[in-house]
Image (cartoon, rainbow, N blue to C red):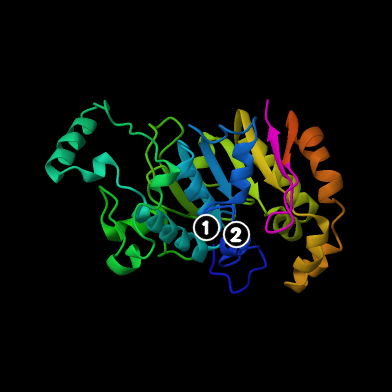
């Protein structure tokens, strides 16, 4: 992956800040799409205990919210832009530093060492803790990390945190992954932030290590337009097929497709996208559902909500794999 000088793949900076502008009914660090999903009767337990892949995770805010607040077993965020993956590390550090410390964080070092020895010896009794509540997310003032530095994540050095939660920075080109991604869906559930990992990769065209274990939920939020414009009709169908193949039986694809009208603005980003725009035959409103159900093989589709007039004006769809 590379450092991009343009944003022709939807790799916008401050993307979530722009999306959340004007939504006074939500906390500033909450994503309206997740709020809508979890209010739906069929999706209220969408992430609980699940392995979740967030494709096109940008700066990691959605991945972080799912891992921290919605009790996911493991969350994997992947984005094509190395700079955004590095920002993911800072997103995680900020969120962890503001939340109320858990009981294990508050223990004396000797007590933590004793429990660590027990875990290494195979004793996991008492490992699970109560999930964090929404009221505990902002236990410390937002200015504290800037004034006093980020809180250390137990068991890692401060220098290692960016390595655990960000992209490997030393190599240019090829696939980059963050340490900790060896956790599979068979591994014990971890508390935030240890249940969260990020990769820098063009997931539509290359594999990441966790693909082999498959996912319970795949999120494809606000990225189909860019995959379609860069990969043409064939690339989009290939992406849909990969999503299907990587989802466990009984799992779900959560899709936020961008309407055809938005393609007209996006094609102005580069001459290549402009040329590709006129080659496209598939249309989001007319063809995506048919392809996903009749050609790819998803069993059924559910539309969650058509959205609102500001910030979020697209429908969310859940495709179910039998």
Instruction: Report x, y in % for residue 194.
Output: 37, 44
Which quadrant holds the N terminus?
A: bottom right
Instruction: Report x, y in % for residue 76.
Output: 50, 45
Magenta: main secondary structure: loop
Which of the pair 44/224 is nearer the observer?
44
| Residue 294 position by quadrant | top right
Q: Is residue 147 left or right of residue 4?
A: left
Q: Are the residues tagged 2 and 1 within 8 Å (C-beta)?
A: yes
Q: Residue furthest left?
A: 110
Q: Is residue 309 magenta?
A: yes
Q: Which mark is residue 272?
A: none
* Residue at position x 57%, y 51% in the image: 31
Which secondary structure, mark 1? loop
Q: Which mark is residue 28?
A: 1
Q: Residue furthest front?
A: 25
Which of the pair 262/39 is nearer the observer?
39
Residue picked out by circle 2? 20
Q: Is residue 258 left or right of residue 90?
A: right
Asked whether residue 212 appears in the rendered view, the answer is yes
Which secondary structure, mark 2? helix
Instruction: Report x, y in % for residue 59.
Output: 52, 59
Q: Which residues are magenta?
A: 305-322
């Amino acid at each position: 992956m590379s450092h991009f000088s343009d944003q022709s793949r939807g790799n916008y900076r401050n993307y979530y800040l722009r999306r959340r502008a004007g939504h006074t009914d939500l906390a500033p660090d909450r994503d309206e799409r997740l709020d809508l999903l979890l209010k739906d009767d069929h999706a209220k337990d969408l992430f609980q205990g699940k392995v979740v892949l967030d494709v096109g995770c940008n700066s990691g805010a959605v991945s972080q919210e799912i891992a921290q607040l919605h009790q996911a077993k493991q969350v994997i965020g992947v984005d094509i832009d190395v700079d955004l993956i590095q920002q993911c590390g800072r997103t995680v550090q900020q969120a962890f530093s503001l939340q109320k410390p858990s009981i294990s964080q508050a223990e004396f070092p000797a007590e933590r060492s004793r429990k660590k020895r027990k875990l290494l010896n195979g004793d996991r009794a008492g490992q699970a803790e109560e999930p964090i509540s929404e009221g505990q997310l902002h236990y410390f003032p937002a200015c504290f990390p800037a004034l006093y530095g980020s809180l250390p994540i137990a068991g890692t050095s401060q220098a290692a945190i960016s390595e655990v939660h960000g992209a490997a920075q030393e190599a240019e080109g090829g696939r980059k992954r963050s340490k900790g991604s060896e956790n599979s869906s068979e591994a014990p559930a971890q508390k935030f932030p240890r249940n969260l990992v990020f990769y820098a990769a063009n997931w539509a065209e290359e594999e990441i290590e966790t693909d082999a274990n498959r996912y319970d939920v795949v999120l494809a939020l606000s990225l189909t337009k860019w995959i379609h414009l860069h990969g043409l009709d064939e690339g989009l169908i290939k992406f849909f097929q990969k999503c299907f193949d990587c989802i466990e039986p009984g799992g779900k694809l959560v899709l936020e497709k961008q309407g055809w009208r938005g393609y007209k603005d996006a094609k102005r980003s580069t001459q290549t996208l402009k040329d590709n725009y006129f080659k496209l035959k598939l249309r989001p409103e007319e063809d995506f559902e048919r392809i996903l159900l009749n050609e790819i093989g998803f069993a059924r589709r559910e539309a969650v909500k058509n959205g609102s007039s500001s910030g979020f004006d697209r429908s969310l769809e859940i495709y179910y794999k039998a």
